[in-house]
Amino acid sequence: DGCVRCPVGAECTDLGLTVPVQPQGIFLKQVGDDWEAMQCAPYAVNSCPRTEDPAVATSKCAAGRDPESRVCALCLDGYFQDGDECAKCSGSASGLPVFLSMIMWFLTLLGTYYFCNSPVTQAASTLLTTSVGLGMMLTGFQALSVMANFSVEWGSPFV
């Protein structure tokens, strides 16, 4: 076969006559007769573990990592990114929270309907409408008094 230069970042023995060993944080990939060494994903420090066995030196990724992805950056199907590791998904999501939320929404809507149509609320409705109307009128007068203090210099087209 001949000698092959050890890729930068890999660990080689016997002056390049053996397959390089993948150190922690380095991803080794064989391209033809040469080896390519790349830094593993910086957000996932443990994505490329050290390998001692030259038979598995290439494309060795941590558990749950996809060896086909560049530098073990992606998680396998059925796994998700959790910090710097890929954690196994725990099955399908339960529809119980959605169902309970819908029940609570319906009960709130029903309670609001009965509260708004009760005799006590209907009597208070007239007082509430009058109070809101007077409050809006007071706010309008305050806005007009503030605008009366503005000093605006109008240009020639408006004078």
Image (cartoon, rainbow, N blue to C red):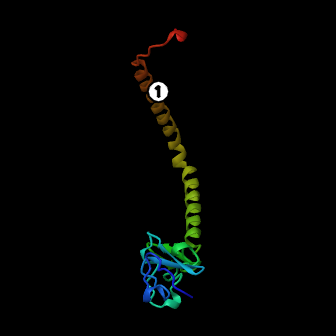
Quadrant housing the N terminus: bottom right
- State the residue at coordinates (52%, 38%): 126
- State the residue at coordinates (54%, 86%): 2
* Residue 4 at x, y percent in the picture: 51, 82
Q: Residues within 10 Å of mark 1 (few under 14, many from 20)?
A: few
At label 1, the amino acid type is Gly
Q: Which residue in the protein does label 1 denote? A: 140
Describe the element under mark 1 as helix, strand or loop. Answer: helix
* Residue 8 at x, y percent in the picture: 44, 75
Asked whether, in this view, residue 141 is left or right of residue 91, the answer is: left
- Counting every numbered tag in the picture gives 1
- Taking depth in this image into account, of 13 and 125 the one nearest to the observer is 13
- Taking depth in this image into account, of 72 and 83 the one nearest to the observer is 72
Quarter-of-image position of residue 12: bottom left
Up/down of 62 relative to 44, above or below: below
Up/down of 10 relative to 42, above or below: below
